[in-house]
Amino acid sequence: MKKKFTKRLLVFFVSIILLSLIYIPLFKDMKFGLDLKGGFEVLYQVKRSDGKKLEVNDLNSTYDVLKRNVDSLGVSEPEITVEGKDRIRVKLAGVTDIENARKVLSRVANISFRDTSDKLLMDSSVIRGAKLSYDESGKPAISLMVKGKKKFLEATTEVSNKASGDNVMVIWYNFENGVNSYSKDMETCGNEGSVCLSAATVSQGFSSDVIITGNFTKEEAESLATSINAGSITTKLNEISSQNVNASYGEGTLTKTLAAGVIGIILVILFMTILYKFIGFIQGINLLLYMLMVMGIFWLIGGVLTLPGIAALILGIGMAVDSCVITNERIKEELINNKSLSNAYEAGNSESWSSIFDANVTTLIVAIILFIFGESQVKGFATMLMITIFAMMFVMVFINRKVLKSFVKTDYFNDNPNRFIKYEKASGKHKDKDNKIKIDSIKILKKCFLVSSLYIVIGLIYFAIRGFNLGIDFRSGTDTTIKASGITVNEVKKDFEKLNYEVISINKQENDEIYVKLNDELKEDGINKVNNYFKDKYNATTEINVVTNIVRQDLVKNTIYSVLIATIAIIIYISFRFKFSYAISSIISLAHDVLFVMILFSLLKVEVNVIFIAAILTIIGYSINNTIVIFDRIRENIGTKGKKINEEVLKKVVNESISQTMTRSIYTTLTTLIPVLCLIVLGSKAILPFNLALIFGLVAGLYSSVFLAGQLWFVFEKRKIKKNKI
């Protein structure tokens, strides 16, 4: 037995090491966001200069202009994404010259038609646009729609009369005299990234729409049409939010966050080993495999890792541990009931599956809603959260169970199951003791309701008077972080008054950083003025984040939609899987948890920003985990009581179910708190509001699941019993 066990343990560790050696090299090419690498981000609202309605083609053409402008900056991993019907977000990680980047991005497209001697024949005013078409043989081509027919006839006639080889009309994108020429760019003309878009032979003059043919693929023809359109429409870019992050700040944040993550994982592995012995140790090691898989999937889909993404990854650790704790507690119960290790292991896994499945589905619902309604960092957080859920179900449920089952089958632990999983088997005069924390939750029902009600009522009154410490995302304006040696708050305040900007608040933070909130929405000139002023006077580095009222209104609207839809989706799912009374009890408990966090943020004046919303929705998903585990046990226990259910039976079931799951609730909360606390102590202040919200939410979730959710269900079911009697 021992030889067989040792062999499998060796195979397990070798497999983990080999998988690590395969996965880890992939991460050297991992893309990092601005908050971890530094750089510049801007969100544009696209409008037509002529006041007409913006069409999809207009947006696509503007996207192409921005893409080409970004290419000219030489940024290695730019992100350009279309958001909604009229917005384009550009992220340029690693860019340090923000002023130049702004100028290059806002540069308009200029399409020109020239001959082989680079003589200008006509500009984009002659055409209405271009679109994908097909020639007579069915090959992809470009249909050029002509507006200035007379000028077009003159230009094409002039080119067609030239000698063979020179009867070519060259289409240029932002042609620069002295830089570009057909003789120099002829070889690369038509290639991706070239400003020479096409060189078409002209056999005669044309005064109407024409077809440009060649050996185009469909993608090449579409790309050329889009590039031509970029120069033939008049759109303008309205900068509605922007952010710049200093490179050294980003790199320092990455180092801190990774260190916090590594320490958090090590502590979780130690905690699991101490709690559960061998099974906890193996599950802890499998956490590393789970982390590798999550990062590997994220790398494969080309994801960009940001601070919220790392937060979702750390949160995923808590969810993965939760699945292990649920299973382990079930196995312990079976062992206490004198089952063999093999039977206890099978029964524990089987009985825990329902709770794990329901808990993760509800979290997945929240992640999907976040992805649909979120933008930028929130969308990245949601993407990572969805990946962690699927990876967790595969590694921490499927793989983990197979690995542990192989160890159980060695029979190494049969004589002493306590070496496999730590538990206390009652004996003698304590033989009826089941080693669970006993709690009469129904007895203290009124006290719990009173405490919660008083806290929420008083807190809401305070909130109505004092409100939130709103971040820039919810109030619009400008946030500026100024870093310079020896700089003081009073000096900076006077400087902004001198620059004629209204300061809402100003305070000094760590590392000689001064954080300033301005009421003004700085435009490009204002941003450059502030940057240059503090650089010249203090040799300071500045980070400026601007959000306009347009973005703020959309964020508030999307936040309301997200919370409402998440709530409705959870009600529907729990009603389907359980009963409506469970769903209503869950939603009331969730409302309690959300209000608990919001009131604490108001009391402590912690800044509320866009990441706070991700935290609130995460709390909704995570808090429901605790509640569903208890409800799953209530449903199981009520099923053993037959059809004669009265108030006393309900009391017994609720008390028994909460007592049976209490240990699991405490352990799960503690193991999730470990990495979150590591992020607070060692990580970046940029996600401090997120981490604080999680801590408050975890504490509130533990309280509501143990002292509110089951009791609420009892109240609803008791009323139903009384109504049926009447």
Image: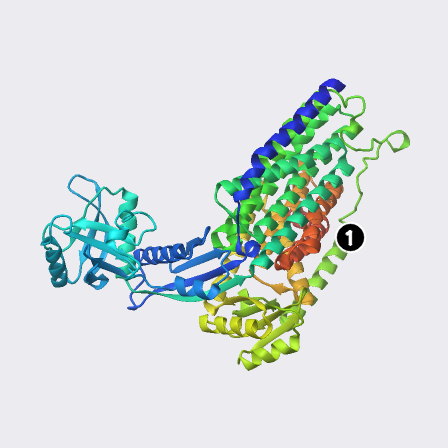
Disc 1 target residue: 444
Closer to the camera, 210 or 566?
210
* 55 relative to 380 in the view: left or right: left
Q: Is residue 650 visible?
A: no
Closer to the camera, 719 or 559?
559
* 610 relative to 233 in the view: left or right: right
Q: At 59% across and 40% down in the image, what residue appears?
A: 358
**Mark 1 Cα within 10 Å, few/some/many (few <14, many 20+)?**
few
Q: Quadrant of residue 603?
A: bottom right
Dot 1 amino acid type: Ile
Closer to the camera, 17 or 333?
17
> Which percent across, then down, holds residue 678?
70, 51
> Which percent across, then down, holds residue 416?
81, 24
Q: Quarter of the image containing the N terminus? A: top right
Q: Secondary structure at mark 1?
A: loop
- From what the image shows, is residue 484 above or below residue 24? below
Q: At 61% across and 50% down in the image, what residue appears?
A: 311
Q: Quadrant of residue 415?
A: top right
Q: At 55% across and 51% down in the image, what residue appears?
A: 381
